[in-house]
Structure formats: C-alpha cells, structure tokens
Image (tube, grey):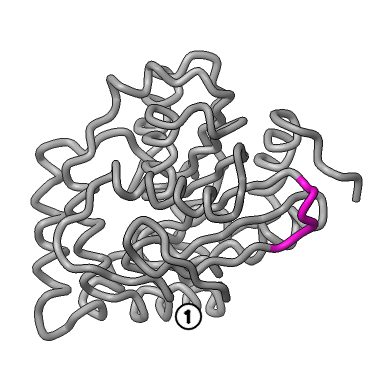
Amino acid sequence: MLKARINGIAMAYRVEGPEEAPPVVLHHPLATNLTIWNELTDDLLPAYRVVRLDARGHGGTDAPGGAYAFETLAADVIGLMDHLGIAKARFLGLSMGGMVGQYLGVLHPDRFHSLCLVSTSSQVPAEARPLWDERIKIVAGPQGMNGVIDGAMARWVAPDALQHNKPLVARLRAMIAATPAAGYAGWCHAIAGLNVTDRIAAITLPTQVVVGALDPATPPAAAQLIHRQIAGSSYVEVPGVSHMLHVEQPASFHAVVLPFLAKHGPQPAAH
C-alpha cells in the first residue's frame, strides 16, 4: 500500500500493471476499501495500469470529521491522478464511486476517456434523506459501524448469495466494521444531498451504466434515469444480482465492463 498527500489528506492507494499501459481508476463503494476491486484488478492486469484508492474516510486514508462534498471527493481523484502523472484515464466507480464518476464527468471531462457508472444514482429523493440522517446517528452512537452492518448486507447482496456465499458475506461485513465512523458519516452527508440529474446531461464522454436487477439501494430505475440523461450512454442490467454485483458474480460483471473499457481510449496491451 502506498501513501501520498492528496488534496489535504494522507491517501492510501495502489498502482499495479505496466507503467506504459493505459490507466484505469477504480473507485470503491461506501463502507468498503480498495480491496473490493481485487477480482476486477486481476482481470485488468497486465493490459492496464490499475489505480485503486481508499477514498477519503475509508481504509488507510485519513477520515476528517464533518460533512464531505462531492466536489472535494472528485478533486481527491484528480489529485491522485496528478500525483501519479496521469493526464487521462478510464474511470469505473460503484455506488458512491459512481456518484463521484458523475461529478468527474461534469467537472473534469478532459481527464477521462470513459466513465463506467455501476450500482449508482444521480439523486437522493427528499423522502430518502431521513434514512441517511438515521445512519449518521447510528454510527455516532455506542454501536458505531456495527449498527449499520445488517441493514447494509440486506441491500448489498441478493438473498441467495446472502444465504449461501458465506466468504463474501464475511468479507463485506468485515469491511463495514473496519470503516471509520467519521468517514462513513462524512460521505452520508454528501450522498443525502446528491442531486446531479440535470447536470449530467452535459456529459459527452463514452459512458456505460450498469446495475444489478435485484438492487434495492440504487435500483434499475435510478440507473435508467442516468442512462436517459447522458446521451449515447449504454445501459446494462445484470440479472440475479444486487448492489455489490461485482463481487457477487465477478465473471458476469467482467463480461459486461471489460469490452466497454477496451473500446474507449488508448488500446490495452495484448494479454
């Protein structure tokens, strides 16, 4: 694990693959860390230079207190790219990572060849905001992050996998438990106020929108809205999986995203 001073914080990150290979930046979802991309990283190497970060407030990266803003969270990605001397990359983000991806597409389109927005939403409706306030309250209390684990698992993983894929369930539960409460709360504030539906119509980058058919957290309707707003985007709904489709069924996920990544930007090295 490497560390660098990025945008005012100490950020943990990993870079793998040949230096001359085209870079891909992977952004993880809430209450996880960069290891959530282990499977995808394995399939991207050695054709790509894979950049993974622990987002602000997660993993080995600093977790400042207070509410975070998506402009800052997008600037964290750009700051890491600057630190690594990456002028332009492919971007793939899941859930909050996909929210950051939308901001990157609006604010920093010149830095990306393409966007892959997975299990994500462009807005949180007013009626859903109390849910986020409740989560902030729970993690600040005596239970801490343990208080949000069961609820998250019910949203993240399809019922069949939740029952039968014990190693995956244990891996995800451990990631949630290890997330700093201040970091989780900081992101919850940002997510609760999310509303970029109108702004993303300005995105002209090649964009792929991917969602699990069984995802209750960012359902297909939310993904379809993003797809409608971004002209020329492609939309893929993966059957039988939920929010964390990339670890629930890695092979199905990779079959969707790898051809898209290969299509846009400098060509990957031959395997």
* Image coordinates for residue 68, horizontal then vertical, percent: 22, 54
Residue toward you, 239 or 30: 30
Q: Relative to residue 259, is residue 246 depicted above or below?
A: below
* Image coordinates for residue 11, horizontal then vertical, percent: 43, 67
**Residue at 45% across, 23% down:** 227
Q: Quadrant of residue 46?
A: bottom right
Q: Quadrant of residue 141?
A: bottom left
- State left or right for residue 96 relative to residue 20: left
Task: Return the residue at label 1.
Answer: 170
Q: Which quadrant: the N terminus? A: bottom right
**Residue at 11% across, 85% down:** 142
* Image coordinates for residue 185, horizontal then vertical, percent: 20, 64
Residue toward you, 190 or 128: 190
Looking at the image, which residue sits at the far bottom? 142
Q: Which residues are magenta?
A: 16-21
- Tell me, yes or no, whether the highlighted magenta stretch contains residue 260: no
Considering the whole magenta stretch, tell me its main secondary structure: loop
Query: Mark 1, residues whose alpha carbon is within 10 Å: few (<14), some, or many (≥20)?
Result: few
SS state under label 1: helix
Q: Quadrant of residue 144?
A: bottom left
**Residue at 42% across, 36% down:** 104
* Image coordinates for residue 3, horizontal then vertical, percent: 50, 72
User: Type of residue at label 1?
Assistant: Ala
